[in-house]
Every structure is written in C-alpha cells, then in structure tokens.
Image (tube, helix red, strand yellow):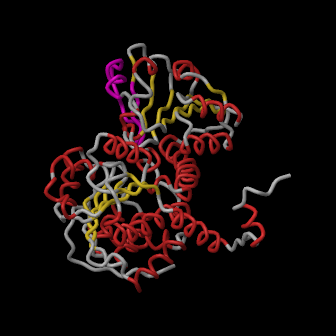
Amino acid sequence: MPVLEARTGVRGDVKDLSLAEAGRSRIAWAAAYMPVLAQMKERFEKTKPLSGVRIGACLHVTTETANLMLALQAAGAEIALCASNPLSTQDDVAAALCEFGIPTYAIKGEDNATYYSHIESVIASKPHMTMDDGCDLVTTIYKKHNELLKDMIGGCEETTTGVIRLKAMQKDGVLPYPVIAVNNALTKHMFDNRYGTGQSTLDGIIRATNVLLARRNLVVVGYGWCGRGVASRAAGMGAHVVVTEVDPRKAIEAQMDGYRVMPIADAAKIGDVFVTVTGNYHVIREEHFKLMKDGAIVANSGHFNDELDLEGIRRISRGVTTPRTFVEQYTLHDDRKICILADGRLVNLSAGEGHPAAVMDMSFSNQALCAAYLASQHEALEKKVYDVPVEIDEEVAKLKLSSMGVDIDVLTPEQEKYMASWSEGT
C-alpha cells in the first residue's frame, strides 16, 4: 500500500481536520486498487502536463476522487475542490486532502446554502479548467462569473446528467468553453455506470435498510447503463426485477434481458423497492406514491434528488420519522408507510461509499488524460461538448487489461488490409 505524506496549512472548509489520518489511510487503500491511475500519476510527475493550470473541481469527495486529485497535483496543477452533492462527501477524505495541499470545501450533510458557498469558494480560485460532476460548477460560472471566461481553457464532465445539461447549453448557444464528456468514454459508462452503479446502489440500499432483496419486486426506473447495472445486480441477489422506460428501444432490451417491463403507474402498485436512474425530473410523482404498498422503499441513484417528487409525498403525508440513518419514513393519511432513502439523493454515495475503486480507476484515468489533452489542445477546440478522444479511451482499456494480467490478440497485416478494403467479397 503506498505511503502518502501530508502537508499542512491549506485553507478549506471541512468537518474536522483531525479526521485526516483516517482519510489518508483510506485514500491509500483505494490507491492500491487503482493501478492505471497510478501509472498516470507516475507519468505526470515526470512530464508535468498541467504545470501552471488552475483546476476547479466539483466532484464527489471520496477516496477515489482523492487519488485523482493527487494525480492532477503531480501533473503540476493547482486544484480547489468542492462537493458535487451535499451527502456524498467522506469527511475524513476531505480533511486529508487539505493536508495534501488541496483546498477542499465539503462537509457531508451540508445545506443548500453551504453547498453553493463551497462552489463559490472554488470559483474564487479563478480556475482555468473545470472538472464537474453534474454541471453545477459550469452553470454557476456562466450565470454569475462571466469575467472569468476569458481565461478558461475547457472542462471535463463526469456524469450523464451533467452531459445532458452541457448539451442543452450548447444547443442554446451558451456553452462557455469546450468540455469533454468523460462520461461518454466506453471505458467510463460501460463499466463505471453499469458495474459501479449496479453494485454501489444496492450496497447503499442495504446499508440504509438491511432489507433482503431476494423474492422482492425491485423496480428500476430507467434502463440506461446505470439501470442495466442495477437490474442485473438485483436479479443476481434474487430480486424480481421490473423495468420502466420511455424509450421503446431500451424497453425492448430490458424485456429481452428477462425483466418485466411496464409503465411506472403499474409498477408502483407491485414494487417493494424502487430505484430511479434516469437523470430526469419527477419520474416518481405524487400519484405514484399514492399507489404504493405499505412499507415500500424508494431510492434514487441519479445525480439530483428531483427525480423524486418529494414535495408530492409530503403533501399526502401526515408525518415523517427517521427510524434509521438515511431513512425517512412517511406516514400517509391512510396510515400506509413509504420510506425515502437519503433524502432522495444519490443513495450509493449518501448511504454507501460509492463505486469501488477498481472501476473508478478507469473513469478517473480518463479524467486525468482528458485534462492533459485540454491543456495542450484547447486552442484548436470550439465551444462544444466533445467525446473522449478514441486514443485516450483505448489507452485506458489497454492499461487496465495489462494491470489484470490479460493479453488479447492483434490484427495481422492481412486482416488490417481486409478490414480497410471494399473489394473483397464472397
């Protein structure tokens, strides 16, 4: 396990700096499962591709994120970090990052005003580049700090919801600088979103409730890569999976994968556990809560808690209690009880630890390489949302396979010629 040395005297806003020692230990533990990012860090220490670049980061403050920050620091970047969700911060990690010389503004459970004050603290560092998870940093800079845009060279976006918002900004002609959609890399969304979200979401639900998933009807709302992951992991634990969708192509896929597919209004009547993973607004609404069974459990693993109509359930309830940490039990007027987990926020990061380090290794290696790419290539880029360059995606995949001790075939010259030709036929 790598030994991480600390530096003191760095400003920030964290719960308790005395937690730093525990945070350093956990960061080192995660680093042992992130061999690709370790190679990036070693390379960056020699080449310094981000020398003189100030990075403003709004990400989930976890052990895996900490290792990304340390890799960027090794590359020569000056970094300021805040949380991208009020409940996703690991307080010991935030404290440790301050000691590593990275100003960190994040406290688990911070209120909305503190959340945005922390974003403002990051913006006060006058970043040249943003690294976002949900687009809150980009939109705040655009709305309130236009004077900084002249020095901005680009940004990276980590999650599906953020990419959706960025593409909407591009469509409206207000995207302020080029942004690389790291989420769209195959080595990100096919693994992080599917295997990471799948495992960590169920982990968060089980930690919060200790519910047995076997034989229960588990409703997955949305069958993108995150939904696929949640469905497959839940089925593996013996749950009877139901999928709701608005995209007919994804609905067919869910059906072919062996799951029941139906509208949310029908699923609401039979579900025992609900998980939303759409990135959309109010996908479970007041009328759906009215249909749910007594004891239904509702969780969200999409980026924002407005996937759930929380005002709606409050309107039809006569009271709420907290029987367990991260569990709010609403009592409806007819005495049925419905449990909302983690205030409807990302249950995998709020009630759990988020994605395993081994899968974030690929996601954050993409982030690190894309930051270096932006630093060298930004003058040639337009104010658009870009996919991760294929060569970066492939490099991350090759390095991950190598770290696993896995070899694959390569095309022969004859095969390469065949694949590039139109003249060969039957």
228, 342: nearer the viewer: 228
149, 223: nearer the viewer: 149
Is 200 placed left or right of 80 in the picture? right
Q: Residue at x 47, y 32 (%)?
A: 298
Query: What is the total number of numbered labels drawn onto the structure image?
Result: 0
Q: Report the residue that reaches farthest toward the top.
A: 334
Residue 247 image point, x, y percent:
55, 30
Residue 335 image point, x, y percent:
43, 17
Is residue 161 magenta-colored? Answer: no
Q: For residue 167, which quarter of the picture?
A: top left
Q: For residue 212, which quarter of the picture?
A: top right
Residue 157 image point, x, y percent:
38, 54
Residue 402 image point, x, y percent:
64, 74
Q: Residue at x 49, y 47 (%)?
A: 204
Q: Residue at x 70, y 71 (%)?
A: 406
Query: Is residue 398 positioned above or below 299 on the image?
Result: below
Is 94 placed left or right of 208 in the picture? left
Q: Report the residue that reaches farthest toward the bottom.
A: 46
Q: Report the residue that reaches farthest toward the right.
A: 426
Q: Residue at x 52, y 70 (%)?
A: 34
Is residue 312 magenta-colored? Answer: yes
Query: Is residue 159 positioned above or below 414 on the image?
Result: above
Query: Is residue 417 positioned above or below 84 on the image?
Result: below
* Residue range highlighted in magenta: 310-330
117, 313: nearer the viewer: 117
Q: Report the residue that reaches farthest toward the left.
A: 147
